[in-house]
Each structure stands twice: as C-alpha cells, then as structure tokens.
Image: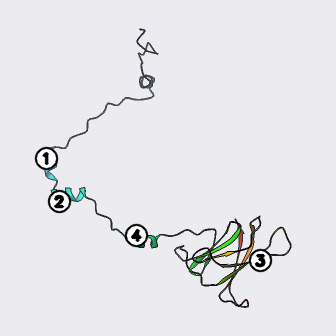
Amino acid sequence: MAGDRTYFPAMKIKTLTGLLVGLGCVQMIPAQPTPTPTTDAKKSVPKADAKAKAAPAAPVKKDGKQKKEDEIGQIQGMTLPRGTGFIGLQIVNGVFKLTTYNAKKKPVAADFTRVVLRWNAPYQKLPERTQLTPGGGLGSFTSEKIVRPPHTFRLSITLFTGDADDAPAENLSLDFSA
C-alpha cells in the first residue's frame, strides 16, 4: 500500500476526477464515436452542389480609396453641429484648436477666414478673448494665447468670412469643458 496513493481507502479514489465522480459532483459520460457517412449518402449529393458549398461566394472587393471615403471619422474635442457639417473645438498644448468637419466627420477646408473666442475666466472680472488664425492642418484654426485652467466656462465663438470686423458670418455659444 506504500506505492498506492489512495486518499479515500473505502472509495479507492486516486485522482481529483475520481473524487468528484465519487461525491456525485460530476458524471462521467462515455465518448460517442462519430458516425461515418454511408456510401449511399455520398452518392445522393450531386457534385455541383458540393462544389458550391465548398467555395463560399467571393466578397466584392472595394477600392481602398472608396473604403476610406465611406468610413466615418472621429471629431476631436467638443462637437458643434454647423450646417451640413461639424466644428470640433479642443485645447491642445494650452491653446485653442478649432477644426471644421463634413457630414462624414472628415476634416474639410473652412468657409470662414477668422475666428474670435470670448469667455469669462473665473480668475478675473473681465472676459478673456483670443483670435484664432488658420494653421495646424486642413480646416484648422489655432490661437496664440495660452488658456489658463480651469477649462470650464461659457464660450462664445464668432466666425468671420472676410477681413472686416463689422460683418460676422456666424455666432455660436457652448458650455466648454476640457
């Protein structure tokens, strides 16, 4: 009995599986052999159907450029719907960055030339202001002024189409938080 490692001598259990079966926790199910198809079943299947089932229909391949155009992009920062597109506004390295997007959320050239932002800073009485100029990519405008935290405030956005300050093209407003 020195070589026999039975832990439960009355049950003669030598493995953990044997213990679980002995306690009734697990049932042992004998393996069933897989049935082999008969020769009659093989003959009844037409060869044309077998070939059709074996080779799935080839998917229609799209051109790589078309696939990229069909994908919907992602807008960086806070999103503002505007006309048929969107505006994304974020703070990158301490400065504002505004980017224009089309309906598929891809960056596009802006239909305005300048952007002026105004917000009430919690650390002073007068509102802060900055002008965004084109730069930083397609349809992007950036500011030169560093925005001090906290970055939670009501932001007024004025878009200009020309060089004149007297004719803003559009005014937008949002609760900004970064």
Most foreground residue, 34 or 142: 142
In the image as oriented, which residue stretches furthest toward the top?
1
Q: Secondary structure at mark 2?
A: helix
Q: In the image, residue 175 lies at what x, y percent?
A: 72, 71
- Sooner in the amino-acid sequence: mark 3 or mark 1: 1
- Give the CA distance from mark 2 to mark 4: 34 Å
Residue kind at label 2, given as amino acid type: Ala
Residue kind at label 3, given as amino acid type: Arg
Residue kind at label 1, given as amino acid type: Asp
Residue at horizontal 44%, vertical 25%?
A: 20
Q: Check the image and report above or below for 177 versus 129.
A: above
Residue matched to label 4: 64
- Sooner in the amino-acid sequence: mark 1 or mark 4: 1
Q: In the image, residue 81 lies at what x, y percent?
A: 61, 76
Q: In the image, residue 30 lies at what x, y percent?
A: 32, 30
- Circle 4 Cα neighbour tier, 10 Å, few/some/many (<14 / 14–19 / ≥20): few
Residue at horizontal 65%, vertical 87%?
A: 161
Residue at horizontal 44%, vertical 22%?
A: 19
- Give the CA distance from mark 1 to mark 2: 17 Å
In the image as oriented, which residue stretches furthest toward the right?
125
Residue matched to label 1: 40
Q: Check the image and report above or below for 11 versus 67.
A: above
- Sooner in the amino-acid sequence: mark 3 or mark 2: 2
- Give the CA distance from mark 3 to mark 4: 44 Å
